[in-house]
Amino acid sequence: MKTLTINGTVRKDKGSKDAKTLRQSGSIPCVLYGGKEQVLFSVTENQFVKLLYTPDAYLVNLELDGKTVKAIVQDSQFDKISDKVTHVDFMEAVPGKALNVKIPVITHGSPPGVKKGGKLAVKIRRLSVKGLVDDIPDQINLDVASLDLGQSIKVRDMKFEKIQFLDPANAAIVAVKMTREAELPAATPGAAAPGAAAAAPAAGAPAAAAPAAAKKDEKPAAKK
């Protein structure tokens, strides 16, 4: 995984009032779980730009009052109006202990189904995986060059020996969806215009009888 260093300050005070004061001063309250003890600390807001506003997954080197701890972001909360980060939970990367991480999906190749008018849809942009921090890749690379119309790559198709995928096995990660253009048959040269077939008699049906022609030699009926 990619690494990123963040400097934090261990919090002496706790509670919502202290957290509010931190946010007003440009710092974000954070919590570190997973180690021997829970640690409350704060980080200046600008340090989260690269960590949270990106699809990449990072292993974070947390510098807390002179002590370095390796961790990953477990959860983050944002303000509903301003979309600014308001709280971040970190999980300590303990040697030999598996972590749950979401890693980005990157597609490669040009599917033949797209050339036929279909559309490539990425349904899961970040896959949830479980594994040791040293075994977790930066991203999942998917080769979509063989996908035809209606075909997909599902979670169960992933083959990685040292990590476990946590999303439903039958969930599609990427798929080539049918579009209206792909469903319409190509026009055949010389084909009859729509509706022309309705005017023609059905195959094998008797032709409509033509109006009987008046007989020239027929004499009018005699008057009584």
Image: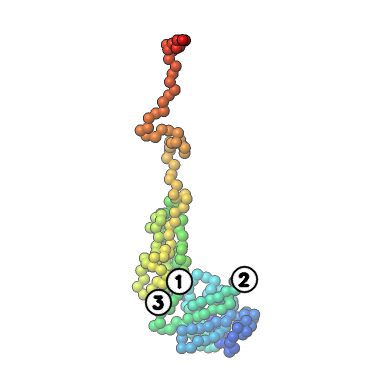
- The type of residue carrying mark 1 is Ile
On the image, the x and y values in percent for residue 19 come to 60, 83
Q: Which mark is residue 103?
A: 1
- In front: label 3 or label 2: 2
Query: Residue 81: which numbered mark, if any?
Result: 2
At x 55%, y 75%, the residue is: 77
Find numbered disc 2 in the image and state the secondary structure of the residue it sits on: loop
Q: Badge 2: few (under 14), some or many (20 or more) residues near its Cα, within 10 Å?
A: few
Q: Quadrant of residue 82?
A: bottom right
Q: CA distance from mark 3 to mark 1?
A: 12 Å
Name the mark on residue 141.
none
Q: Nearer the viewer, residue 126 or 218?
A: 218
The residue type indicated by label 2 comes to Ile
Q: Please report the residue visible at 44 percent of the width from the left and 70 percent of the height from the top.
A: 127
Quadrant where the N terminus sits is bottom left
The residue labelled by disc 3 is: 131
Please name the residue shown 40% across and 71% down the image: 165
Q: Residue furthest front?
A: 224
